[in-house]
Image: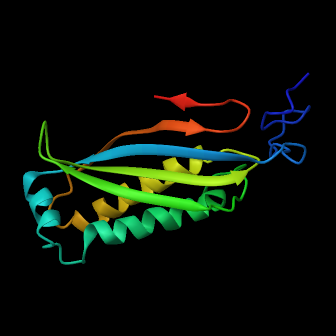
Amino acid sequence: MMSEWTHFDENGNARMVDVTEKKPTFRTATATGSLLVSEEVLSAIEGHAIKKGDVLTVAQVAGIMAVKQTAHLIPMCHPLLTQNCAVTFELEKEPSPRVTVRCTVKLEGKTGVEMEALTGVSVALLTVYDMCKALDKRMVMTDVHLEEKTGGKSGEFHF
């Protein structure tokens, strides 16, 4: 017998998990990831010298917009009413130049927000790449992962 919490029906066909009987709980998820960059790119971001504009502001807006569009991008994700989303950045020189993005999503609902947080991080990183690629195309997205989540039946998770 198939579990009611899978994305497959009794015939093996893809389906959205039915959450109608679940009770809403307060849920959070935080994801993070990095873009390895050259010293030149890091300096240009810090100095607001990228011709396309303020890289971190544009990437922040892109990450927030992506969180709100996750259900349109990933099959079987439920559309969620995000109540709060924060996308922040850390520019690091050591051990190697990088831009680290952290995305935290909060809501009260019947299903978790892990995919939204991961999508927010990924799109913010892609936006930094897009805005800086004229300087250097050798940037590498790395270490995108869920840091923590709270709420729901599965409880808390900490990486």
Name the quadrant containing residue 58: bottom left
Residue farthest toward the front in the current orientation of the protein: 26
In the rendered image, the quadrant that contains the N terminus is top right
The spot of residue 18 in percent (x, y) is 86, 44
| Vertical position of residue 112 compared to residue 67: above or below | above
Who's the residue at 17% across and 64% down the image? Answer: 45
| Vertical position of residue 159 compared to residue 78: above or below | above
The spot of residue 33 in percent (x, y) is 36, 44
| Vertical position of residue 99 compared to residue 14: above or below | below
| Vertical position of residue 65 compared to residue 143: above or below | below
Q: How many marks?
A: 0
Residue 1 as seen in the image, left or right of residue 56: right
The spot of residue 149 in percent (x, y) is 56, 38
Name the foreground residue: 40 vs 12: 40
Who's the residue at 13% across and 40% down the image? Answer: 96
Name the foreground residue: 95 vs 15: 95
Who's the residue at 36% across and 65% down the image? Answer: 59
Residue 147 as seen in the image, left or right of residue 127: right
Who's the residue at 70% across and 53% down the image? Answer: 108
Residue 146 as seen in the image, left or right of residue 28: left
Name the foreground residue: 83 vs 123: 83
The spot of residue 120 in percent (x, y) is 48, 56
Q: How is the image coloured?
A: rainbow
